[in-house]
Amino acid sequence: MGSLVSRKKEPLPSADGSLSRHIGWWLTLPLFFSGCADGPLYGLKKMNPVITKQWKTDQELGPTYVQRLEEIQRLRSQIRSMSADEQAGWLESIEQLVGNDPSPEMRRQAVLALKGLPQQQADEIISNACKDESEKVRLAACEVLSAPPNPTRLTLLEKLAKQDESMAVRIAAVERLGDFSSDQALAPLEEALRDRSPALQYAAVQSLARTTGLKMSANVAQWRDYLEQNRDAIGTPGGSKEQAGTVAAQGERAVR
């Protein structure tokens, strides 16, 4: 695979100054160390002297999977407090992780580090994550796509909600559509209401309630009828608060 980055990262600002002491290793050698991943018996393996000896040998060569995971999680906690220039530098490394790391969990953690970052490059990385073969990575993409919301992210969520092979991902995308304004999210949420999956319909109802402010029952048929009759009032960009309040009051009376 070769080296994934061509320059050495400076240590991230942290209380103990240790955040990126392994950063070069976990970006340039992900394939080598992916075999060190441990499952739910991680704690028991620490007690096994054979396993412990092997870990010490691994650590002499470079950071283990667990150490790499700790590093990316620490990056997640600090990247939003960095300057724009610092964030841009780390976005390059995150892009390499998302595109090349063999571990789905490492790719997932890298995607989650993008939450709240407004840069166009972040959108491009998330777009690639939406096509990842791992469901958990695509679920992470859904989680970060609405923070902050923009037209590109709306389009990505619409596509996931309609086309993804995983129902869990489709539901997660529909849930995040509720974070967008009603004039943006109304059409894809209406389409989700027409899906044959009751779980997807329910997610659409919950998101519609959030984005429109309507306090209606979870009856899918009533939502369909009401949206058909009031689509223009609900989905008008920049609609007044008075208009929204009138529509909401009508919706509440409609289900009493």
Image (spheres, rainbow, N blue to C red):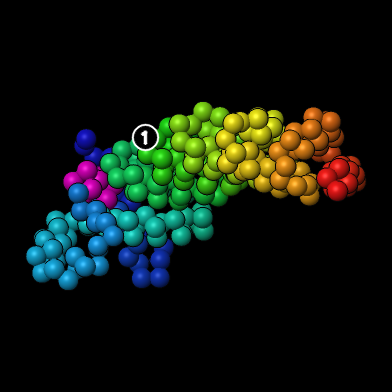
**What is the total number of numbered labels drawn onto the structure image?**
1
Query: In the image, what residue occupies the spot 33% across and 60% down?
Result: 70
Q: Bounds of the magenta span?
A: 26-34
Residue 220 in view of the camera: yes
Query: In the image, what residue occupies the spot 58% across and 41% down?
Result: 199
Query: In the image, what residue occupies the spot 34% across and 48% down?
Result: 106
Main SS of residues in magenta: helix
Q: Residue 159, percent across and down?
A: 55, 29
Q: Residue 2, percent across and down?
A: 21, 37
Q: Is residue 215 left or right of residue 174?
A: right
55 drawn magenta: no
Could you tell me which secondary element the residue under label 1 belongs to?
loop
Question: What amino acid does circle 1 point to?
Answer: Glu
- Pointer 1: what residue? 133
When the figure is inspected, residue 176 is found, relative to residue 227, above or below; the finding is: below
Q: Is residue 20 left or right of residue 195?
A: left
Q: Residue 110, percent across and down?
A: 40, 48
Query: Which quadrant would residue 234 be assigned to in this image?
Result: top right
* Mark 1 closeness class: few <14, some 14–19, many ≥20 residues within 10 Å: few
Residue 231 in view of the camera: no
Q: Is residue 11 left or right of residue 59?
A: right
Q: Is residue 14 left or right of residue 210?
A: left
Residue nearer the viewer, 219 or 12 = 219
Query: Which quadrant would residue 151 be assigned to in this image?
Result: top right
When the figure is inspected, residue 192 is found, relative to residue 179, above or below; the finding is: above
33 drawn magenta: yes
Residue nearer the viewer, 56 or 5 = 56
Query: In the image, what residue occupies the spot 41% across and 63% down?
Result: 13
Q: Residue 189, percent across and down?
A: 66, 35
Q: Quadrant of the N terminus?
A: top left
